[in-house]
Image: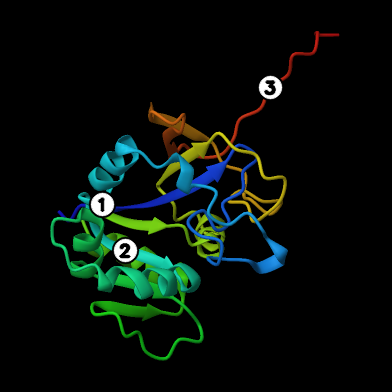
């Protein structure tokens, strides 16, 4: 019997839920966002260790077009096979969700058009993890179709007041289970949540 893999979404978030442009000022200035690079001051050995461990568990990567373009411009230029991120990204299969990309130049990349249909097939194809990193627009589509099995949320001790959010006003209601949490030396809280069906509800009201 074939074991179906799981789709994981890893996202860096501020305390007010912003995920936009964590790595550099020019990463995503859309909407007039002026806080790009907010993650960088919090990088430490703990972060590098946790990231390396996560990438070691990947069977394949699924990326949105914007994140793919950022990764494709950087990681193929990092040839050091001792770098766990570069090694995984350059070696393993990559899938980019795009309706307009005709051909992907990064070796090992396949373009997918129908996210709902093709991502479900990817989860059946790979027994391990199909990992999504960043890719905010893609994450919204994956959540809409209930395709996310696990969230790995990095919560940074900073508030920006505006920007793109992972869980926006259109988020589909869902219950989650905390599977594990850790902290880094710079105060980042890394939590893993697994889907647990629909939310349940109750009341603190007194019986009449």
Circle 1: element type = helix
**Residue 110 appears left or right of 91:** right
Q: Is the C-beta separation of discs 1 and 3 under 8 Å?
A: no
At x 46% / y 76%, what residue is drawn?
114
**Foreground label between 2 and 1:** 1
Mark 3 or mark 2, earlier in chain: 2
The outermost residue toward the bottom is: 102
Q: Which residue is mark 2?
A: 61
Q: Which residue is mark 3?
A: 202
Residue 4 appears in view: no
**In terms of image quadrants, where is residue 184?**
top left
**In terms of image quadrants, where is residue 119?**
bottom left
Q: Position of residue 115 (x, y in %)?
A: 46, 70
Q: Position of residue 47 (x, y in %)?
A: 34, 40
Q: Indicate how the structure is coloured in the image.
A: rainbow
Q: Which residue is mark 1?
A: 55
**Foreground label between 3 and 2:** 2
User: How far apart are the alpha carbons under marks 1 and 3?
Assistant: 39 Å
Q: Nearer the viewer, residue 177 or 90?
A: 90
User: How far apart are the alpha carbons under marks 2 and 1?
Assistant: 10 Å
Circle 3: element type = loop
The N terminus - image quarter: bottom left
Q: Is the C-beta separation of discs 3 and 2 under 8 Å?
A: no
Q: Position of residue 68 (x, y in %)?
A: 41, 71
């Amino acid at each position: 019997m074939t074991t179906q893999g799981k789709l994981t979404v890893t996202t860096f978030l501020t305390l007010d839920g912003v995920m936009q442009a964590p790595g550099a000022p020019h990463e995503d200035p859309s909407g007039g966002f002026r806080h790009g690079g907010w993650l960088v001051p919090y990088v430490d050995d703990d972060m590098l260790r946790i990231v390396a461990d996560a990438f070691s568990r990947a069977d394949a990567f699924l990326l949105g077009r914007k994140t793919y373009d950022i990764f494709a411009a950087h990681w193929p230029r990092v040839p050091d096979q001792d770098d766990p991120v570069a090694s995984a990204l350059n070696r393993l299969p990559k899938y980019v969700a795009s309706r307009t990309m005709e051909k992907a130049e990064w070796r090992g990349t396949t373009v997918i058009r129908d996210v709902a249909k093709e991502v479900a097939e990817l989860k059946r194809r790979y027994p391990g993890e199909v990992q999504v990193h960043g890719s905010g627009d893609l994450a919204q589509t994956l959540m809409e179709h209930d395709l996310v099995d696990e969230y790995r949320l990095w919560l940074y001790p900073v508030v920006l007041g505006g920007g793109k959010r992972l869980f926006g006003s259109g988020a589909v209601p869902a219950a989650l289970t905390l599977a594990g949490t850790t902290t880094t030396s710079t105060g980042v809280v890394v939590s893993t949540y697994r889907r647990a069906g629909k939310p349940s509800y109750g009341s603190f009201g007194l019986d009449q």
